[in-house]
Amino acid sequence: MLKYELEDLTEVDEAVHSLYTEKDGKYILAIDGLPEPEDTSGLKNKLNELMGEAKEAKRKARELESIKERQEEESAKEKGEFKTLWEQAQQKLAEKDDELSKFQKRIQEKDINLAANNIGAQLAKSDSKRAEVLSDYAAKYARHNGENVEFILGGVAISETDLMNFLKKEYPFLVDGSSASGGGASSASGSGASKEMNRAEFSRLTPQKQMAFIKDGGIVED
């Protein structure tokens, strides 16, 4: 099976080298209809900036904490200035921690989407609509452990290949090369389905009706 992303072309047979395009020092499998992965470098640079600011805020907070311990209780009561500075430092630190947490979450979500899109693209190379639906299913089993994306099935960590095999069995009608037309499958229009449907409605359909909807050119919206 061809990999979506390679560090070096020597990882695959020379006969398929022309199928890859070099981008940012890596080789990406060219697939018609697959959207370009979103560049997260800007977010990651901002994350590093926020981490630096948070580190500096923590340093200042420690300095003020040390000053607080040395101050005489009477002097602190009379002036009240230190208490104000200390509370301001704590508030700023909390704000930086919250902003940092939000940026980390956004980056993790993008990493999960990228991993899920990679699975969808490998399972449905010939149809971007089916690849998008499979990516959505794959994302439901993806988790970010703080360092990288992992896949969980039934509370157990599994590999990307195991998840792909699971999706092939669960949704064979969405996978390339499947002949699962389903004897009980009816057309999307015959079942009352429209040409556009949100993901919640699509998930409630039977597998046969999901297949019919996609084959009839239906669009699943977020």
Image (cartoon, rainbow, N blue to C red):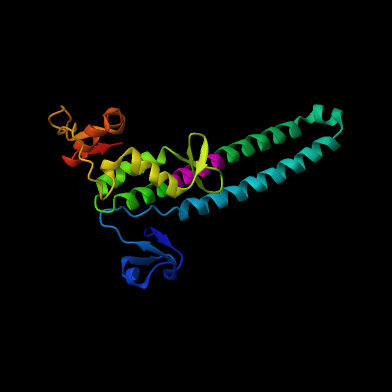
**What is the quadrant of the N terminus in the image?**
bottom left
Residue 173, picture quadrant: top left
Total residue callouts: 0
Residue 87, image x and y in percent? 69, 32
Q: Give the range drawn in magenta.
A: 99-113
Q: Does the magenta stretch include residue 120?
A: no
17 or 100, nearer to the observer:
17
Residue at the image position 72 percent from the left and 35 percent from the top: 86
Residue lying at 20% horizontally and 40% vertically, measured from the top left: 181
Is 181 positioned to the left or the right of 158 in the image? left
Q: Is 110 part of what is drawn in magenta?
A: yes
Depicted 201 relative to depicted 32: above or below: above
Residue 103 image position (x, y, % from top left): 51, 43
**Residue 179's spot in the image, x, y percent?**
22, 45
Q: Quadrant of the C terminus?
A: top left
Residue 60 shown left or right of residue 103 in the figure: right
With respect to residue 54, does 88 lie above or below? above
Toward the left, the furthest residue is 190
Q: Is residue 6 left or right of residue 200?
A: right
- Position above or below: 25 against 34: below
Depth check: give the residue in front, 147 or 104: 147
Residue 21, quarter of picture? bottom left
Residue 170 image position (x, y, % from top left): 34, 38
Q: Main secondary structure of the magenta part?
A: helix
Residue at image coords 31%, 61%: 30
